[in-house]
Image: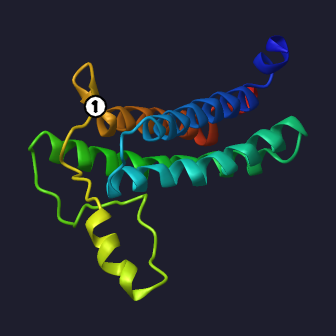
């Protein structure tokens, strides 16, 4: 199987990208599951993964079934665009966390809030609403917050996708 992947570098690159993206977004879900509540920008940074993984699956399937090369390359270029947007959002949030600039938007997220069905529940739910500050670093590793690590991962996925979609030498495709 490894030999087969090495002989089809576009397939290997799409698989590598997909595994990395699924791993990164799974880590975000796990951190949320163990109690780290995401802010609005954290949730926005997941959108490229939700767009990119299905596009990578299209590239993988196209390469695996020996479909048209342009389809796999086009899917990877779209993936690169999505992850570039994610990297920009991550750098924006990380810069605000480090105090380089202020956020220009209201940064709140409440993933546990449910819409009341009765008027009497409205006031009770307001007491339960929780605002998560996008500028507060709730976790860091090697000096980088979630946003900082996502900036690195999204940039890497962008570069890998661009390489596969545009720069991979034709003789290797």
Q: Residue furthest bottom?
A: 119
> Is 29 left, or right, of 71 in this rendering?
left
Residue occupying the point 32% across, 45% down: 90
- Along the line of sight, which residue is nearer the eye, 126 or 59? 126
Residue 130, horizontal then vertical, whole percent = 28, 59
Q: Quadrant of residue 62?
A: top right
> Is 71 left, or right, of 74 in this rendering?
right
Residue 161, horizontal then vertical, whole percent = 57, 39
The crowding category of the residue bearing disc 1, from other C-alpha atoms within 10 Å (few below 14, some 14 to 19, many at least 20), is few
> Is 43 left, or right, of 49 in this rendering?
left
For the N terminus, give its image quadrant. Answer: top right
Q: Name the residue under label 1.
A: 139
Q: Residue furthest front?
A: 120
Q: What element carries label 1?
A: loop
Whether residue 145 is visible here, answered yes or no, is: yes
Residue 63, horizontal then vertical, whole percent = 82, 38
> Is 100 left, or right, of 59 in this rendering?
left
């Amino acid at each position: 199987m490894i030999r087969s992947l090495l002989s089809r570098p576009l397939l290997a690159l799409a698989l590598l990208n997909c595994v990395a993206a699924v791993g990164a977004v799974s880590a975000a879900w796990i951190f949320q599951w163990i109690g780290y509540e995401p802010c609005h920008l954290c949730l926005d940074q997941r959108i490229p993964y939700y767009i990119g993984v299905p596009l990578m699956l299209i590239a993988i399937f196209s390469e695996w079934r020996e479909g048209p090369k342009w389809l796999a390359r086009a899917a990877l270029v779209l993936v690169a665009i999505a992850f570039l947007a994610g990297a920009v959002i991550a750098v924006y949030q990380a810069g605000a966390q480090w105090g380089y600039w202020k956020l220009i938007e209201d940064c709140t997220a409440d993933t546990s809030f449910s819409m009341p069905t009765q008027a009497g529940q409205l006031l009770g739910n307001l007491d339960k609403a929780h605002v998560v500050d996008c500028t507060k670093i709730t976790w860091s590793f090697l000096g980088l917050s979630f946003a900082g690590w996502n900036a690195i991962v999204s940039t890497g996925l962008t570069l890998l996708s661009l390489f596969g979609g545009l720069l991979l030498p034709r003789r290797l495709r």
